[in-house]
Image: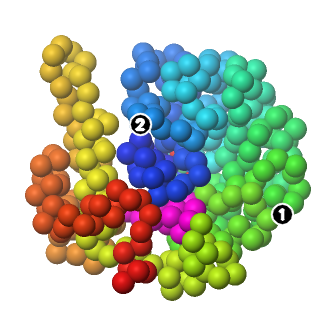
Amino acid sequence: MAGYSDAPMRQLAAEQGALWTVSEMISARGLALGGENESLHLGRPYPGEVGRVVQLFGADPDILADATRKVGAWFAPAAIDLNMGCPVPKVRGKGGSCLLQTPETAYELVKAMKSATNLDVSAKIRLGWDSDRSVEIAQGLSEAGAAVITVHGRTAAQRYTGEADWHAIARVAASVPTPVIGSGDVLTPAQARQRRALGVAAVMIGRGAVGNPWIFQALASADPELADPEVADPEVADRVPDLPVRAAAALRHAELQHHFYTVPHRHRPGELKVASMRPLRKVLPKYLPELTELHPALTGVETIEDVRALLQPLTPEESVTMLAGHSRYAGSRS
Ligand SMILES: Cc1cc2nc3c(=O)[nH]c(=O)nc-3n(C[C@H](O)[C@H](O)[C@H](O)COP(=O)(O)O)c2cc1C
């Protein structure tokens, strides 16, 4: 998710049990023709990061092939994904959901990407441009060699309005031999399990994971009380941790941000460029929705010291330990 699924957020999701994560989309043209290198934050993994897919957008086969080679060499991803779903005008003329209007181009792009790497190449689509063509498009992508197809159950014209159509996603899953991952409007573990039962290979969680990395925990847990659809009680499995644990996670998100984005200054050797907390302004309040009185301060943070000053008083030692254990639901055990 552009603006969200950067290395710190992916790290938190992975710690909580996410099976795999996907980078923010990266311009193939920027990688192939721009002055980028392996230090590009958008592609760079967190130290030790595994199970991460890097996503590209673009519309030109040669450029995508070149970008695919660079992504493989620089960022060591688990797979490379083609974005065919982004509806924002900035991306539209250059790939993204535009490709749903000319899916034959997308099939060529997948083939070009595959010719440039031994890694799996996958694609993420919406149902269509302004009507549902998802089965036809998924079949074409499958024949072109896509190893996985993710379907967001809306058309591009819908953008984010209305509801994701999971029955349309299920029809796609039933009509291609390729594993299909469903995406759209999954906010709780119970919803994820219901949608998984529609026949998709996996469920992708986007907005529902922002400020809520625990959503992956109940799904990944071996504890039947949390994970087994026959046993799982939504009252238990959907419960989020108590406030101190959530505050500790928010603080940890900020510390990961500080660690990842504090890098040597490009133009002043020997100096560090210290990470800004501004990108977290929209995220931190989501960890603590009930603390509305703290939101103005959280949406004004600049530095890691600002975040520490606000959150450390809310995070007693034991909640930090619980977070580090990665697997305890504070609320469900009390
Ligand atoms: C702010 C924002 C940024 C997104 N960026 C991307 C992106 O870079 N690549 C992509 O494939 N999908 C992107 N998406 C779409 C999501 O991956 C997902 O398919 C969609 O939001 C529906 O799922 P959700 O309800 O779980 O969020 C983005 C969505 C949002 C809201």
Residue 317 vertical position relative to residue 92 in the rendered view, above or below: below
Judging depth in this view, the residue of 79 and 282 nearest the camera is 79
Residue 270 x, y percent position in the rendering:
15, 16
Q: CA separation, marks 1 and 2?
A: 36 Å
- Residue 37 appears in which quarter of the rendering? top left
Judging depth in this view, the residue of 94 and 12 nearest the camera is 12
Residue 232 vertical position relative to residue 168 in the rendered view, above or below: below
Q: Residue at x 19, y 34 (%)?
A: 274
Residue 204 vertical position relative to residue 259 in the rendered view, above or below: below
Q: Is residue 295 left or right of residue 143?
A: left
Q: Residue at x 64, y 54 (%)?
A: 156
Q: Is residue 28 left or right of residue 324?
A: right
Q: Closer to the observer: label 1 or label 2? A: 2
Q: What's the residue type where badge 1 is placed?
A: Arg
Confirm if mark 1 falls within 8 A of ligand 1: no
Q: Quadrant of the C terminus?
A: bottom left
Q: Residue at x 78, y 50 (%)?
A: 179
Q: Is residue 20 left or right of residue 255?
A: right
Badge number at residue 61:
none
Residue 237 x, y percent position in the rendering:
52, 77
Badge number at residue 171:
1
For label 1, count other residues whose C-alpha is less than 10 Å away and answer few (under 14), some (14-19) or many (20+): some
Residue under pointer 2: 46
- Highlighted magenta segment, given as a residue range: 205-221
